[in-house]
Amino acid sequence: MSPKSPLSPTTRSTPRRHRERARDDRAELHALLDEALICHLGVIAGDAPLVLPTCYGRLEDTVYLHGSSAAVSLRSGAQAPVCVTVTLLDGLVYARSVFSHSANYRSAVVHGDARLVTEADEKLDALRAIVEHTTPGSWDHARQPSRKELAATAVLALDLTEASVKVRTGAPADEEADVATGAAWAGVLPVRTTFDKPDPCPLLPPGVEPPAHVLARVG
Amino acid sequence: MSPKSPLSPTTRSTPRRHRERARDDRAELHALLDEALICHLGVIAGDAPLVLPTCYGRLEDTVYLHGSSAAVSLRSGAQAPVCVTVTLLDGLVYARSVFSHSANYRSAVVHGDARLVTEADEKLDALRAIVEHTTPGSWDHARQPSRKELAATAVLALDLTEASVKVRTGAPADEEADVATGAAWAGVLPVRTTFDKPDPCPLLPPGVEPPAHVLARVG
């Protein structure tokens, strides 16, 4: 898949509600995945869905997730259908009617059978992608994984073949009658994720300053 | 269930990984659900999991979700096993080894068969709970739902009977050897969700100021 190739959703990955919010730009999917910090991984465990938050990384058109080799979510998701959902909440939409209240958001939903990564080079690349997505600069700054640590870590790969993106932006969509009567105040309360000043580990020797790759994230 | 009754997880709602992070305090579950803005609803659609972000509200020990009466997620979740997961990301944990990198978070995972709310009074109470959770003050300020709007809205109820809470807080948990050698900087980058100044609807008459219940949310 080229980054230029549009999202080509299947039936289940074609949004049915609010189709005007669906996007088919693969670059928009990539940008959303790169901006968000966590995803929610859905698997079928027994006869019920199980949804857990987790970190992830992206390389080209593959999303990588990791966890303990013993984790139920990863064991249930390997070679089985999973759903990875990434959501950015951008605002709360106050409308003139409670019915028209909404949220501004960007969300990606990726379906597919996840693949357990077994090849050593791909596993290392995947772990680097996850670490560099979540904490950019850490892969080179911190100690690299040992053979034992690598063995304790399972990595799942999910291709971005069957993915959809939905986006809502802008003002409330009120009924004309509610706008005319001025039923209530209406507008958007923007929601933002920010980083505060880093909180150093108490075991650091005195005088050690946070490195540039950490400070760069603080607004 | 009394608010004092501890969480009594079943096998599937007993965290297996990092058990030291599990909490059994029902008040902590309530507080987490009340603080977060969105949840991720997992259902089984066909033979695959489907995870979608959505707003919610809580009344006592019931979580309510709503959506279009025609939405696949709601139709798949009614009288069927669902999983509702709520996550607050509190910090990114930079450790001395990449393996010990982690995240500080609070997450709740609720399992159960969701129930379609059909009784009119409960449906109205549930919608009020969802609106007041997401946009406090809006229920009384904005126009109430019409009969037609109520009919177009489906509400699911999920009891907080089978729920678990996991929390990670504090500094990195590095190997002693990595602390001793000072392998890297270590600490926590706090993550915070904030509200920006409200963005008024362009259709509002000039001079209309945001009401106190909206302004109260801005830091």
Image (cartoon, coloured by chain):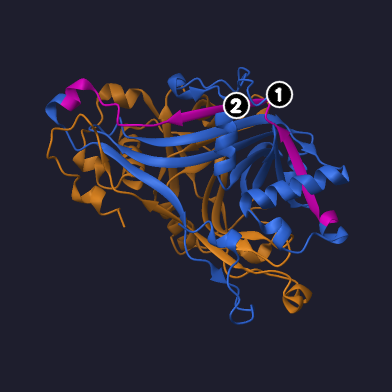
Chain colours: A blue, B orange
Quarter of the image containing the N terminus of chain A? top right
Question: Is mark 1 in CB contact (under 8 Å) with mark 2?
Answer: yes
The span from disc 1 to disc 2 (Cα, nearest Å) is: 10 Å
In terms of sequence position, does the residue under pointer 1 or pointer 2 come before the other?
Answer: 1
Query: Image height check: is A95 above or below B219?
Result: above
Quarter assignment of residue B174: bottom right
Where's residue A207, x and y in %?
58, 80
Q: Quadrant of residue B145?
A: top left
- Asked whether B185 or B110 is in front, the reply is B185
- Please rate how many residues cluster around mark 2, counting C-alpha atoms within 10 Å: few if below 14, some from 14 to 19, many from 20: many
Residue type indicated by callout 1: Met
Q: Chain of mark 2?
A: A
Q: Is residue B101 above or below residue A47?
A: below
Asked whether residue B80 appears in the rendered view, the answer is no
Q: Residues within 10 Å of mark 1 (few under 14, many from 20)?
A: few
Magenta residue span = A150-179
Rendering coords of residue B112 (x, y %): 56, 42
Residue B34 in magenta stretch: no
Residue at (19% x, 46% y) in the render: B211
Query: Which disc, if any, is residue A1?
Result: 1
Identify which residue is drawn at 54% across, 62% down.
Answer: A215
Identify residue type, mark 2: Arg
Tell me which residue sits at (18%, 26%) in the image: A179
Front position in the image: B84 or A140: A140
Callout 1: chain: A
Residue farthest along the bottom direction in this orientation: A206
Residue A38 at x, y percent in the picture:
58, 47
